Image (cartoon, rainbow, N blue to C red):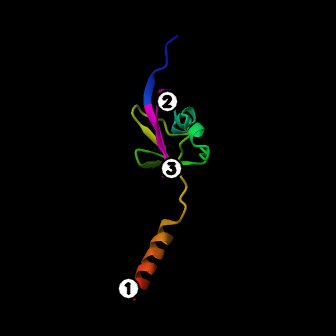
Amino acid sequence: MAENEMIEVEVAYALPEKQKIYGLLVEKGTTALLATKQSAVCKDFDDVDLDSAKMGVFGQTIKAPADYVLQAGDRVEIYRPLIADPKAARRQRAEKASLKKG
C-alpha cells in the first residue's frame, strides 16, 4: 500500500491581543476547511466557528473553504467578523472631522 503524499501548510488566526500560526502536515488534497479543523485553533480560541468563518489564503478570500484544495506552503487565514461596517465608520470619522473644523 502506497503512503499518501503529505504537504506542509499553515493555519493563522488573530485577535487584537493574541495571534497564532499553526504549522500542519496534511495529506495532499486537503481542503482549507479540513486543515483548519485539524489545527488546534478551536482549542486556543473558543469563539471560532470554522463552519461559518470567512477564510483566505495569503490575503485572497476563498469563497468555498470546503472545496479549496491547499497547495504545499499555503497559509489559511481565518477572518473574524467585522464589528462595524467600514463605510459607516469612515463616514462617522468624516462627519466628526468636519464638525471640528466648522
Residue 98 in picture, x, y percent from top left:
41, 83
Q: Position of residue 92 (x, y in %)?
A: 48, 75
Three-letter amino acid code at the position of disc 1: Lys
Earlier along the polypeptide chain: callout 3 or callout 1?
Answer: 3
Alpha carbon separation for disc pair 3 and 1: 35 Å
State whether the magenta stretch is mostly helix, strand or loop: strand
Report the residue at 40% width, 44% height from top.
58
Residue at 43% in and 27% down:
7
The spot of residue 90 in percent (x, y) is 45, 71
Mark 2 sits on what residue?
A: 29
Q: Nearer the viewer, residue 61 or 41?
A: 41
Foreground residue among 45 and 65? 45
Instruction: Indicate the amino acid at tag 2.
Output: Gly
- Element on which disc 1 rests: helix
Point out which mark residue 12 bears.
none
Residue designated by label 1: 101
Numbered range of the magenta stretch: 9-28
